[in-house]
Image (spheres, rainbow, N blue to C red):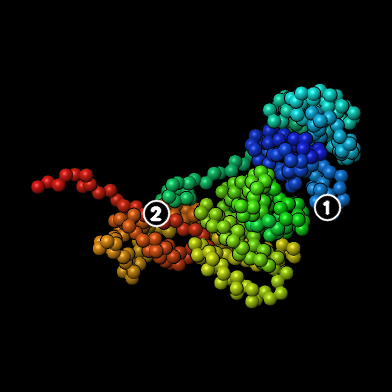
């Protein structure tokens, strides 16, 4: 059985750096600014022969419960309750602070085994801070440098001593590796082995969903409402979420991994390094997601930034679903709903028929309908059409509306086949791909979307020509 370790301490002692070191990846955002981490993040970690789950937490601050630091502290207290072992982290370089002594008392009262970690021990003058750490009464401080990986063998021995060998070396569950989605130059998606096969949709596979939108649209509140617990930090302040936090959830027997992301503002407004890192983390979550829920504030929908976020998701080849949040604040719902449907079709023609659902994260309204739309879109995103059906469809298209003549020469289309799924990608074999007008490619895409019922997902069209066996040969007289 694996165990859980919570990394606790005041702001800016290097908790997230230690978390990244144990996880083996730069998952948590790290910056010199105190208080970067706000939500608690859980991930599988390894320390030599020890396998466990590690929880990164926000810096412990003494503040009123209603304030943002106070709500961050509540998240940290939840992490302490969940953990089997606590890494109480102090800064050996700056020595003990009054807050260290206050929070050492909180950790002691929890009754959990504690390992006292003296981070930044590689710094000049850190020896004094290391000796000071004895005053906390939490046992021998372990000098480490999370940044440079020093002191890890001593930390491993301290974990075994604190938990006992039987608990420390219990059976560990195998870590699920995240599959990277294959990409090619023209068609983004996964290759199809048999172009004529149309396999059934597998609804047992885990699903990765990213939740994105502008700051203060209600992304974290929506995820809390979906999973039914206060897992993510929320509040009236804009831009609370900084890290992209993943949450495991089970919906109607299907395993789902939800990724909460930081609010994305216009590029010109993003000046601070920390916000740039947060947005980059969010973009990474979009690339690894299958479905992306775009949360729009129903009171101010379709701002320019909303459309840019949607365009980015479509270009990445992810399957978008729109959630119009804060619907409980709308006075004329029927009138606004008709207006939003018209705007959705007009402003997002690249994903005609996109699923758009009205929800209220605050009251829990429309959440089941949102998830049903997610599954429906995921099925379309995975859909596959046999080559025979495609070419029978193409015959009708060419008879009804053949491609135009360019420079006096008729363009010929020979056949079409589906080369990829996730999103659907099609290869059209034609005589002169470079001369084919984009308007006709759009016509083919829209006709295909309608004929094979593929609403709301990006569709890729790649034009190809077959090799001319006589090209390059000199003309014989």
Position above or below: 289 against 88: below
Q: Is 269 placed left or right of 55 in the picture?
A: left
Position above or below: 29 against 137: below
Quadrant including the N terminus: top right
Position above or below: 387 against 472: below
Say which residue label 2 marks: 462
Tag 1: Cα neighbours inside 10 Å, few (<14), some, or many (≥20)? few
Which SS class for mark 2?
A: strand
Among the two numbered marks 2 and 1 on one chain, the one whose residue lies closer to the N terminus: 1
Residue drawn at point x = 52 percent, y = 46 percent: 181
Q: Camera-side residue: 443 or 110?
A: 443
Residues at badges 2 and 1 in contact (C-beta under 8 Å)? no
Residue drawn at point x = 9 percent, y = 47 percent: 477
Residue 12, position in %: x, y?
77, 37
Q: Camera-side residue: 335 or 84?
A: 335
Q: Is 375 placed left or right of 444 in the picture?
A: right
Residue 269, position in %: x, y?
64, 52
Give the quarter of the image for residue 377.
bottom right
Say which residue label 1 marks: 67
Asked whether the viewer can see residue 253, the reply is: no
Q: Camera-side residue: 269 or 444?
A: 269
C-alpha separation, residue under disc 2 versus residue under disc 1: 53 Å
Q: How many marks?
A: 2
Residue drawn at point x = 84 percent, y = 24 percent: 128
Asked whether the viewer can see residue 180, the reply is: yes
């Amino acid at each position: 059985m694996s165990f859980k370790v919570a990394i606790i301490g005041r702001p800016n002692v290097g908790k997230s750096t230690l978390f990244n070191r144990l996880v083996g990846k730069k998952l948590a955002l790290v910056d010199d600014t105190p208080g970067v981490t706000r939500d608690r993040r859980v991930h599988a970690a390894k320390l030599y022969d020890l396998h466990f789950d590690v929880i990164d937490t926000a810096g412990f601050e003494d503040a009123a419960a209603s304030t943002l630091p106070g709500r961050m502290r509540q998240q940290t207290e939840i992490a302490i309750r969940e953990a089997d072992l606590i890494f109480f982290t102090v800064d050996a370089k700056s020595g003990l602070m009054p807050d260290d002594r206050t929070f050492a008392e909180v950790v002691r009262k929890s009754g959990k085994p504690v390992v006292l970690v003296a981070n930044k021990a590689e710094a000049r003058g850190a020896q004094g801070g290391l000796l000071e750490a004895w005053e906390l009464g939490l046992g021998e401080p372990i000098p480490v440098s999370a940044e440079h990986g020093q002191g890890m063998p001593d930390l491993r021995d301290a974990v075994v001593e604190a938990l006992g060998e039987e608990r420390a070396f219990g059976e560990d569950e195998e870590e699920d590796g995240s599959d990277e989605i294959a990409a090619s130059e023209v068609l983004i998606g996964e290759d199809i082995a048999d172009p004529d096969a149309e396999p059934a949709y597998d609804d047992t596979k885990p699903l990765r969903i990213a939740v994105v939108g502008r700051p203060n649209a209600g992304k974290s509140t929506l995820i809390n409402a979906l999973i039914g617990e206060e897992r993510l930090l929320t509040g009236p302040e804009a831009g609370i979420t900084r890290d992209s936090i993943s949450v495991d959830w089970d919906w109607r027997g299907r395993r789902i991994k939800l990724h909460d992301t930081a609010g994305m503002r216009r590029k010109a407004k993003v000046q601070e390094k920390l916000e740039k890192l947060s947005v980059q983390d969010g973009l990474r979550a979009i690339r690894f997601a299958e479905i992306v829920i775009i949360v729009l504030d129903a009171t101010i929908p379709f701002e320019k930034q909303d459309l840019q976020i949607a365009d980015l998701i479509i270009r990445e080849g992810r399957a978008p679903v729109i959630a119009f949040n804060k619907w409980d604040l709308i006075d004329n719902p029927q009138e606004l709903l008709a207006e939003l449907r018209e705007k959705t079709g007009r402003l997002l023609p690249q994903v005609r028929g996109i699923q758009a659902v009205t929800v209220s994260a605050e009251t829990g309204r429309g959440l089941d309908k949102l998830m049903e739309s997610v599954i429906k879109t995921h099925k379309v995103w995975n859909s596959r059409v046999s080559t025979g059906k495609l070419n029978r469809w193409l015959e009708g298209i060419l008879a009804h509306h053949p491609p135009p003549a360019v420079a006096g020469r008729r363009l010929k289309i020979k056949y079409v086949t589906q080369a990829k799924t996730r999103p659907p990608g099609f290869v059209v074999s034609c005589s002169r791909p470079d001369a084919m007008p984009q308007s006709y490619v759009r016509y083919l895409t829209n006709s295909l979307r309608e004929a094979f019922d593929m609403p709301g997902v990006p569709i890729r069209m790649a034009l190809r020509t077959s090799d001319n066996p006589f090209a390059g040969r000199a003309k014989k007289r």
